[in-house]
Amino acid sequence: MRYIFILLISSFLFSCDFNRSKKPDSGSLAKGDSAIDLAKVAEIKLTNAVEYRKILDQLDPGELTSLDAASMLFKNSVADTLTRDSMFVVFNDFYNNVAGSYLENNESVGSQLEKSPSSEAVKQLKNSLASYGILLSSSEGTFYLEPQTTYLLKNFGSALSPAYREYLTIESRDQQTRFAEDGTILIPPDSLTSRIMSWENFMTKYPDFVSIKLAQDQYAQYLGAFLAGMDNSRVFDPSSNHLNDSSKVSFEAFVVKNPESKSTEVVKAYLDLLKSTNFNYTDKVDSFLLEKVYH
């Protein structure tokens, strides 16, 4: 029955005309030679994530306007809150796909950015992207796009469960200050440990969250960076392999400040391991991180 439903929806949304221009009119979206009628999209009342994914799979991730149809379908859904959470996972995947592929699929925009564009051109593109909640950022001279979590929270939060709203709130707060770049941690230790505890508390509060794996990954990223550093922000001195005094102080302060947390159990065990090696780096550090942090 689901397959038949999707076929009906597809025929309802799409009309093929191989003689039409590749550019759709203002009331439709196109993928190749197929156009989507936005007026008809507004009439659809989806009830589950499977139907939603099938339709989004037919939209063009290289067109920002595909997000209009995706958003409309989500907001017009008649599903319950938990089902909407699952649908939002689908939307978020599509949203990230659009952000990740837009420059690649739009050669004129991509080539313009590669040729040292003027500040005015960059500003215009940023404004265009901002209306869809997509940030234009750059690193080492290379431009890239990333979704803006604040936009998602503002535009979709009211339709989601308290768990998903809290997830987006934490994500939004983290996104406001870049955590790391080019192997260098950009935030101070107290900010890093605050992020660790925010994600631990979230996972404890919502163990059955629909995207709990994403929360776990964020937590592991921060905890791993705290315990081991990054390529250009090492906790072990590169010449002596000895733990930096500042890192040792941070570990001990974390244990004192968060005595009841699960993260403290990990940090305590890490300190015990390091004491056994006179606070020198050994292969045991990597084994510990794989078992206790990145498991």
Image (cartoon, rainbow, N blue to C red):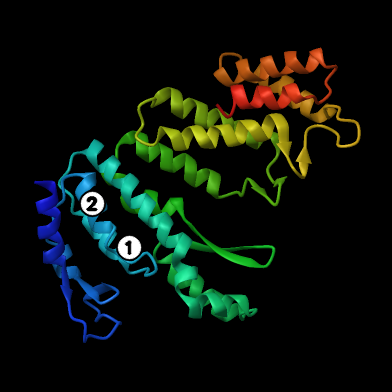
Tell me the amino acid under the disc marked 1: Leu
Residue name at image x 23 percent, y 39 percent? 83
- Marks 1/2 in contact by CB < 8 Å: the verdict is no
Residue name at image x 86 percent, y 37 percent? 238
Distance from disc 1 to disc 2, alpha carbons, whole Å, reads 13 Å
**193 left or right of 219?**
right
Task: Compare residues 202 and 27 and report the one nearer the observer.
Answer: 27
Q: Which mark is residue 128?
A: none
- Identify the secondary structure beneath mark 2: helix
Going from the N terminus, do you reach mark 1 or mark 2 first? 2
Q: Which residue is mark 2?
A: 52
**112 left or right of 87?**
right
Quarter of the rendering containing residue 193:
top right
Residue 125, percent from left and from top: 49, 74
Q: Which residue is mark 1?
A: 67
In this rendering, the answer to whether 202 lies above or below 165 is above
* Number of residues whose C-alpha sits closer than 10 Å to that of mark 2, classed few (under 14), some (14–19) or many (20 or more): many
Task: Compare residues 176 and 16 and report the one nearer the observer.
Answer: 16
Residue 276, percent from left and from top: 80, 12
Residue 24, percent from left and from top: 26, 80
* Number of residues whose C-alpha sits closer than 10 Å to that of mark 1, classed few (under 14), some (14–19) or many (20 or more): many
Quarter of the rendering containing residue 278:
top right
In this rendering, the answer to whether 200 lies above or below 157 is above
Residue 156, percent from left and from top: 32, 50
Residue name at image x 91 percent, y 31 percent? 240
Which one is in front in this view, the residue at disc 1 or the one at disc 2?
2
| Image quadrant occupied by the C terminus | top right
Residue name at image x 44 percent, y 34 percent? 213
- Identify the secondary structure beneath mark 1: helix
